[in-house]
Amino acid sequence: MKKTKWMASGLLSMVFSLFMLTAQAAGISPTEQKLDKILNTYATKMKAAFLEKNDQKTIALIKSASDEAGAEMHKLKPELEKWAQDHKGLKGAEKEAFEKRFQAKPYFKTIFEVMLNPAVAQRLQANPALDKAIKEGNKAFPNFKNAEDSNLEESSESDEG
């Protein structure tokens, strides 16, 4: 049993190393890799939360996933803000490539699958506590758009041209 556990751990480590090398070769920054890890974990946990049929357990899972991801994002906030600020000025083909890469992230697909699932929508309507848990969970994440809390602001249409 210990040998199997050690082998699985070694295999996981090797896969992670290969992922990191692939990401670096693809030009993905260490900050983006950290963000991807946080959001992949969050999306997976949110999907698992809604697979749980007991609403009270789902609420606890949502809170846990949100608190964990939010805490990780808060730790990374200065680094994320610098990274985002560096990417804010992208234009043309660079901007398009960046947007395409982000839209292809697996966690976006997972989150959209969960949030657009009719069964999830039905549960949220039927149980306001679930809907509240989602809204409260969103508050766990740092606010990157508030000028008082962040160096990032939404750019207006007039800023782009």
Image (cartoon, rainbow, N blue to C red):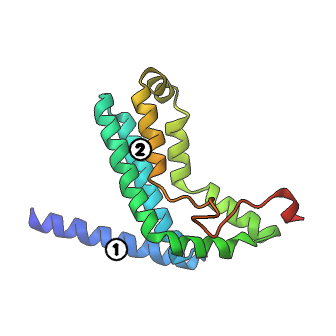
> Residue 36 location, x and y as percent?
49, 63
Image quadrant where residue 84 sits: bottom right
Is 74 left or right of 109, judged from the image as shown?
A: left
Mark 1 residue element: helix
> Residue 47 location, x and y as percent?
41, 42
User: Residue at 63% across / 59% down in the picture?
Assistant: 145
Location of the C terminus by quadrant is bottom right
> Residue 122 location, x and y as percent?
48, 23
Mark 2 residue element: helix
- Residue situated in front as seen by the camera: 66 or 120: 66
- Residue situated in front as seen by the camera: 119 or 13: 119
User: Residue at 23% across / 65% down in the picture?
Assistant: 8
Q: Callout 2, which amino acid?
A: Met
Is 84 left or right of 93, judged from the image as shown?
A: left
Read off the residue under disc 2.
Answer: 46
Task: Tell me the tag on residue 14.
Answer: 1
Disc 2 crowd, CA 10 A, few/some/many (<14, 14-19, 20+): many
The mark lying in front, picked from 1 and 2, is 2
Q: CA distance from mark 1 to mark 2?
A: 27 Å
Is 133 left or right of 25, judged from the image as shown?
A: left
- Residue situated in front as seen by the camera: 30 or 137: 137
Q: Farthest left residue?
A: 1
Q: Callout 1, which amino acid?
A: Met
57 over 15 or under it: above or below:
above
User: Residue at 56% across / 76% down in the picture?
Assistant: 29
